Amino acid sequence: MKVLINCQARFSQVGDEFYSHNLGTFPLWMRYLDVFDEIGIVARAYPCDAPRDGWSKVNQPRISMHPIPAYHGPWQYLRQAGRIQRILKQTIQEYDAFLLRVPDHIGWLISRELRRQRIPYGVEVVGDPWGVLAPKAIRCFGRPYFRWALYRRSYLMCAGAAASLYVTNRALQQRYPSPRAQVTLGCSDVFLPPEAFADDQCRSMKQNRWAAWSTATPPTDEDPVRLLFVGTLNTMVKAPDILLRAAALCRQRGLPVHLTMVGDGIRRIEMEQLAARLGIRHSVDFKGLIPSGEPVRKLIDAADIFLLVSYSEGQSRVLLEAMARGSICIGSDVGGIVELLDREDRVRPGSPDEIADRVQQWVTSPGLLREKSERNHATAQGFRDDVLIPKRRAFYETYKQIVSQRHERRAACRSSKSRAA
């Protein structure tokens, strides 16, 4: 059985090959290939002359790419809408099953065509457009309309799904229910193999450093508290400006901090300029894009506190990766973060004062840090691959049975009509 998957990320196309800096890893697609014979990926693709360092090839045996024009924003989409819809209708005919990621405009277009043809589909709900398009997260004239429209489309996609997989246990289910689904599961899409977890020695090194803050070696400008952010700089959803303001507040209060920001996007120059205006440019390191896996884990291990203070989150993979390393984490009080971090480790979205207060509190109370480190490491154990993979596989198997039963009913109906004729 062949399954079609939509993807909101944009890929790079070099001739007939497709690449991604973070979605090309084969283990990511194995979660589908363990159950289905082949998978197809429909997504936007930008033509490039050659792959860059760190890019991974996506199309491999049993994996096909179905590129659509690489539009950006609603106005570019409108110019390509007719062509995109023709591509999607043609692509649908090649597949037996459909697992649509929510939210995504391409997924919405596919689901609309599938409902028209009365073909059952499954959804994988990985984000919340209502939060992504919150007032402080996106600044554009049409934001209120797009917020309502994307929320409504995501709601309808889930409402019409035959099978629904959510990356949270409660948060997304409450906002985007699936009353008609024959199977529903809450299961993170994080990828945490054994090497993603820090061993006792690695965690002890960090904990010993924290313990020394109150005795021999408190933080100094030469050895500051090391803060880490990993996320896109294409929008303000991850609140990079709030992190910069929080770092500036810490330094104003006499706490030396250094902020490392991993990620890139059209807002990067704006964030660099903001850091300069706040007087902390020398204390912020903009790393740009870093390949996932070991390179990111090294940065997490080198940091003291991991920060994820987004305006919206589904179930953050990078937060779970940081927790698996035994990191101290501060997150915003939204989405799946609520299910991962204790209340005292969370802050209101858009509140640099609260972030600075938390950082100061933890640094001046190092006795709490070891407890929080071990607690985060233990929580992440529940998201190990050997825990999540069987759950996902059971979900896909059930959805595959739903599709197979439909095909059997249609075949029986055709056979009955043929005999009657």
Image (tube, rainbow, N blue to C red):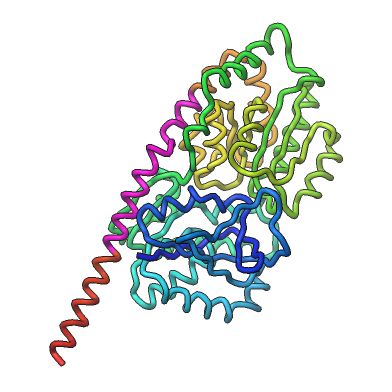
**Residue at 62% across, 39% down:** 309
Left or right: 217 as drawn, with respect to 376: right
**Residue at 69% across, 7% down:** 215
Whether 166 is drawn above or below 48: the answer is above
* Residue nearer the viewer, 138 or 287: 287
Where does the image place residue 295, in percent across and percent down from the top left? 64, 37
Q: Quadrant of the C terminus?
A: bottom left
Left or right: 401 as drawn, with respect to 421: right
Furthest-top residue in view?
Answer: 215
Residue 273, by quadrant, is: top right
Q: Is residue 160 visible?
A: no
Question: Magenta part of the protein: which range?
Answer: 375-402
Where does the image place residue 200, in percent across and percent down from the top left? 52, 19
Whether 217 is drawn above or below 278: the answer is above
Left or right: 413 as drawn, with respect to 153: left
Task: Please name the predominant secondary structure of the magenta segment in the image.
Answer: helix
**Residue 20 located within the stretch drawn in magenta:** no
**Residue 379 located within the stretch drawn in magenta:** yes
Where does the image place residue 229, in percent across and percent down from the top left? 67, 37
Residue 417, by quadrant, is: bottom left
Residue 8, by quadrant, is: bottom right
Q: Is residue 133 visible?
A: yes
Where does the image place residue 87, in percent across and percent down from the top left? 53, 77
Q: Quadrant of the N terminus?
A: bottom left
